[in-house]
Amino acid sequence: MTTSVLICDDSKLARRQLARSLPEDWETRIEFAENGLDCITKIKALNPEILFLDLNMPQMDGYEVLEAINEQGLEVLTVVVSGDIQPNAHERVRTLGAIDFIKKPCDAKKLSEIIEHHGIKDRARRKNIVHKLGEQLDSELRDIYQEITNVAMGQAGDLLARLLNVFVKLPIPNVNVLEVSELHMALQSIDSNVSTSGVCQGFIGGGVSGEALLIINDSSFKEIASLMNYTGELNDKVELELLMDVSNILIGAILTGLSRQLDMPFSQGHPVVLGQHGDVAELVKANKDRWQRTLAIEISYGIEHHNINCDLMLLFTEDSLKTLKYKVAYLLED
């Protein structure tokens, strides 16, 4: 199947060099854009599967193109090709959704490795799969998200079990697309009448971003402290330290597990305390500006023979769904 490719660079020489560097055995239909404005117009008109994008261009640079792609919800896989090799440039374009970065002058071998690594040759076929995922395979897509989360949460549960020397009860993850107003309803395992404390940690990588939200019943802290051999008096400071310890284990391990399965490294931000000693509705309400419509994956951990309950929820931004669908499309291929 022919793959539609768009090459955007203000240099005619650079456009032709990149076109000649594409693998000879790759059946493509190549179009060119001379600047960022032209690029956005042609993405809309041609609907290419792949965009090779320069950064330094007149009228509209590559960063602005990536921002426009995100803002306008355009579906195209983007590889940046630029002479700007600063580490900050690499990080910035990945944050904006580019899947990879190759420096100029374009090296055919490196370009071929990137194409192979991301399965770009099969992008046209995979795009059809993704289209079906969005329209016809909602239940199957949910099953895939549940399964990869199941593997990741097992790794997180194992770490917690080893640390506390206990048996961790692992549930079936719940997967839903929610509005922010529905988040408190999703946390069904937490009694709305009990006092809770919560922490949130952002993550980002390869066009996917979101936040991990951990909420623990305040009644759990006494037993958590005992299992961690803490013998002093419990107060807000100690409970906050325990909350951070548990969140570091669970959030770090589950993101690592997802990262390995999706072949997508995540960078984690600093944890942020959502609140202490409040109910779930208050925690969500106080932080509602942090989330909008989101893919939510909920995991409710419990510990056998102990009154310890905590909910971990992964909240992926709506903009991340496109990349996630592309990633899991690999798992549906025969």
Image (cartoon, rainbow, N blue to C red):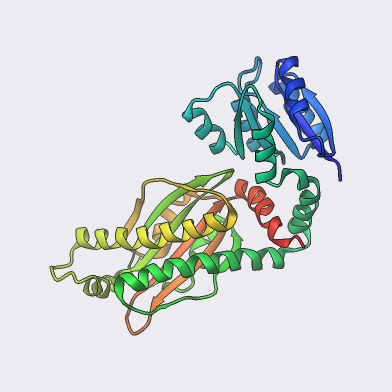
Residue 106 seen in the current view: yes
**Which residue is at the far front?**
109
Residue 268, compared with residue 223, is above or below; it is above
Residue pictured at 67% horizontal, 36% vertical: 78
The quadrant where residue 282 appears: bottom left
Residue pictured at 60% horizontal, 39% vertical: 97
Residue pictured at 69% horizontal, 40% vertical: 115
Q: Nearer the viewer, residue 127 or 331?
A: 331
Provide residue 77's location: percent of width, then percent of height. 69, 40
249 sits left or right of 121 in the view: left
Residue 167, compared with residue 312, is above or below; it is below
Q: Nearer the viewer, residue 27 or 300?
A: 27
15 sits left or right of 295 in the view: right
Question: In the rendered picture of this protein, how many numbered marks are placed on residues?
Answer: 0
Residue pictured at 77% horizontal, 63% vertical: 334
Provide residue 251's location: percent of width, then percent of height. 42, 59
The quadrant where residue 310 appears: bottom left
Provide residue 195's location: percent of width, then percent of height. 32, 68
Residue 277 seen in the current view: no
Provide residue 32's location: percent of width, then percent of height. 79, 24
Residue 109, compared with residue 214, is above or below; it is above
**Which residue is at the far left?**
232
